[in-house]
Image: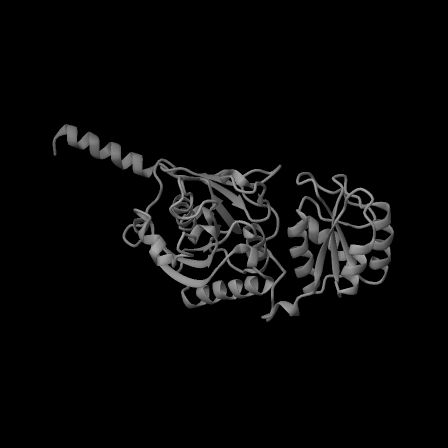
Amino acid sequence: MGRGKLVITIFVACLLSQPGLLEAQPATDKPRITIVATGGTIANSPAGRMGLDAFLEQIPGIGDVADIRIRDYARISSSNMSIQNWIEIAQLIADELAENPEIDGLVVTHGSNTSEETAYFLNLVLDTAVPVVVVGAQRQRTTLSEDGSRNLYDAVRVAAHPDARGKGVLLVVNELIHAARDVTKTISYRMETWDSGDLGVLGLVDTDRIRFYRTPTSRHTVNSALRLDGVTRADELPRVDIVYTYADAGPELIEAAVAAGASGIVVAGFPTGSPSPAMAATLEQAEAAGVAVVMSHRGGRGRIQTGRPFTSADNLTPQKARILLMLALANGASPDMLEEIFLSY
């Protein structure tokens, strides 16, 4: 071997031995990824919602990223997504993991309106360290500058990435990695709608590599104690309603929730974490009658302080506080346990 070739060989060997310089790629087999399709704008076209197989055919290079298996669960708008759908999606994922233990990751395609709620529900009930990535889009197929193709391509890359393991359910859009607990849709139609508020994203999805910069510290997936435990129907979970606070709000919505059989009520309170005076009195009566009351707020950022008359939702949005309260009550949480649960999850 000539001296020049020897130098090049040594240089390449040293380069490959340095962690972080090059992203590790499987020696032979591609990662195995299952995509669970539920519909939403990401699958939408002027002719209707597409099958995922047809969608994948339109994304150049996605077959080079992973060996993809498709589970076509539904083709619905996320505005139609229900608790029953959440239960069934969670069971489908559990079945897929049991049937294919060699799987490297899962992707759930989803409409934008309730993507954060589905992701957080799965984040609490799934018992797996395998990456589960929810992905959506704001612009349907054939629309100018549609975002679905890139988002799905990136979601598959993140689900296949070893650093995504054990971080709970993720939401990947617009080249950003969000934690299911933190992310919220904030804008009606613009693509930058998904936002993780005060806490920020977990990482970036660039063309050359995927980078994680932080890890969720709240309990999720493998260390969650909030399981479905045989629940297969939505009516087996306790009813939890959300009531909204506004100037001069009366007690009527609270009374209606109690009359409808609510086991819990989440209050979207004023940004400082309080209801109107008329609501407060009725909430105290509901709590005395055994209804769990959790205080969130309508402002979108910041946390509710603890030690107040009602359980603090910490910094969870009302819609996510509802999910956590529902599952906490389903798992037998008593009123004096709720504050710690909301601090932990």
Report which quarter residue 15 is drawn in.
top left
Relative horizontal placement of residue 6, taking residue 247 as reference (left or right): left
Q: At x 42% / y 53%, what residue is drawn?
A: 43
Name the spot of residue 44 as percent of width and height, x first.
43, 53
User: Which residue sits furthest left?
Assistant: 2
Report which quarter residue 186 is drawn in.
top right
Look at the image and tell me whether residue 77 can be seen: yes
Circle count = 0
Q: Is residue 166 above or below residue 300?
A: below
Quarter occupied by the N terminus: top left
Look at the image and tell me whether residue 102 can be seen: no
Name the spot of residue 93 as percent of width and height, x first.
48, 62
Relative horizontal placement of residue 269, taking residue 36 as reference (left or right): right
Name the spot of residue 56 as percent of width and height, x first.
34, 53
Relative horizontal placement of residue 79, taking residue 345 as reference (left or right): left
Name the spot of residue 262 as percent of width and height, x first.
74, 63
Camera-side residue: 130 or 74?
Answer: 74
Q: At x 50% / y 48%, what residue is drawn?
A: 171
User: Which residue sits furthest top?
Assistant: 4
Q: Check the image and tell me how it is coloured.
A: one colour
Relative horizontal placement of residue 339, taking residue 139 as reference (left or right): right
Report which quarter residue 50 is drawn in.
bottom left
